Amino acid sequence: MRRVGRLVAAMLGVAVAAGSIAWLYRDELLLAAVGFAIQRRQPVGPTQPVVWQSGVDAAGRSPSERPPNIVLIVADDLGWNDLTLHGGVADGSVPTPHIDALARAGVNFSSGYSASGTCAPSRAAIMTGRYPTRFGFEFTPTPPGMSSVLPMIANRMPGRLRPVLTPDAPGSELPFDEMGVPASEITLAELLAGAGYHNVHIGKWHLGGAAGMAPHQQGFHESLLLANGLYLPEDHPDAVNARVEFDPIDRFLWRVMQFAASYNGGPAFAPPGYVTDYYTDEAVKVIEANRERPFFLYLAHWAVHTPLQATRDDYEALAHIPDHRRRVYAAMLRALDRSVGRVLDALRANGLEENTLVFFTSDNGGPNYIGLPEINQPLRGWKITFFEGGIRVPYFVKWPARIPAGAAFEEPVHGFDIYATAAAAAGVAPPVDRVIDGVDLLPFARGERSDVPHRELFWRSGHYQVARSGDWKLQRNLQPHERVWLFDVRADPSETTDLAAREPQRVDELRRRLAEFAAQQAQPLWPSRAEMPVNLDKTLLDADAPDDEFVYWPN
């Protein structure tokens, strides 16, 4: 009997110990379970070569006679200060000569804005020429489990004073692939296809993968898709990794992401190398394959988004940077800049430079969750806010045949203007059966128009709503209670002086304009499942203080 008692006691002790260990590591166990479920649904096969289609111009025109080729390069989470043109990371010691040269070779739109403080709505605006809220693309699609797991982990992180909120949103959550740009929208690729362009997408999409929303179903003849988000396998001998343990998003990504690509909706396969370089290799091949006909190349880089992974060569080239995380990030930026240089070199080598319209921009600003405070300086705020640090982005346009080098334009322009500008350059009329919010920027770039492209611009993510009218910018956030900021962004681009109390009539007028804008927008196609507090002036590496300023971002 005593032996039985001792056995029971021992078993209870083991159970208690196991339970204690499980409780201690509950976040990791939860992430592991989510990661296993996601990866099980998408097996990744061995590397496959992509054989790009080639062809000739049906009308037999020379490169100078054809409508321009169009190359759109979009970086991911690029900070305003990441470029040496604006200052540069690590005190400007990480040069970005190729991106800087692109800015100087055409027109630098110094007040360029993304459509959102997060990636997917911004990309939806670029592809459609419209405010994404016009067709219900308000919140960023998140992988399975992310919107439920991350709040639990984030709310247990030390140093955080404000919780992630999980509103009781009506309706069931759509599958990840069904959250995207509806097939009824007319993408830039579909518009250009009607004018004889061969359209190729390489890299990130994040605009849906089912119900006709995949890139190869939205006007791109070929698509080399970022099927998952590692730059290299974590244990690859050429990979240098920097985990950001204080960031719940980073912990989630390392658990769920794979090293994978796919071509035109086919099975996932492992890329042959570091994805920034791989996408560039393939972009060069696309340019070579299509040098005899008009083409649209959308090169949507994953860089410099987390997870932070660099090649060993790029990392070792920056030995002067002592901080490991900053050095990995800088090495990723180095690869992105090299990519831009190689794409421009390929256009030149194939005799296409003069008659190619090149855009370079980012989907939003740099995030605070990587713990690098300088990436958006001198702008305030981060990705996942509508402060300038979240939405003012590098915005450069080059077309040697039509735009003078060294041009500069200071008035606000927007990501959706890329649509109208590319369409005008190609000689294609935009759709007339819907509102197109973008405008053709070429007359402004050439000094042919002296007015402004936009007298007003708007941003919205749930209850967080922003209007810029002239030089005035009103921000309105309703969590945990209403907070309003008013800035003169021409005089105060860093948004340090709130003028709301001094300008009540202007606040009321901009509130009215926000309400009028909201009345023209569609209902969200899927609900917000979480509202994240974002410290406006600190990275996640720093503990919150009671008097810090925050916004709550519904997503």
Image: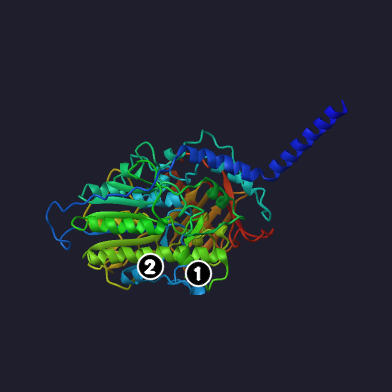
Q: Quadrant of the N terminus?
A: top right
Residue 455 visible in the displayed image: no
In front of the other: 291 or 441:
291
Gap in Å between the C-alphas at discs 2 and 1? 14 Å
Picture coordinates of residue 178, whole percent (x, y)? 42, 38
Q: In the image, what residue type sits under mark 2?
A: Ile
| Extreme residue in the left direction | 60
Q: Which residue is mark 2?
A: 99
Q: Identify the element where label 1 is drawn.
A: helix
Q: Residues within 10 Å of mark 1 (few under 14, many from 20)?
A: many
| Extreme residue in the top direction | 1
User: Does 394 sit left or right of 433 as displayed?
Assistant: right
In front of the other: 258 or 510:
258
Residue at horizontal 50 percent and vertical 40 percent from the top:
38
| Mark found first going from the N terminus, 2 or 1 | 1
How many badges with numbers are in the image? 2
In front of the other: 453 or 261:
261
Q: Which residue is mark 1?
A: 89
User: Does 183 sit left or right of 68 as displayed?
Assistant: right
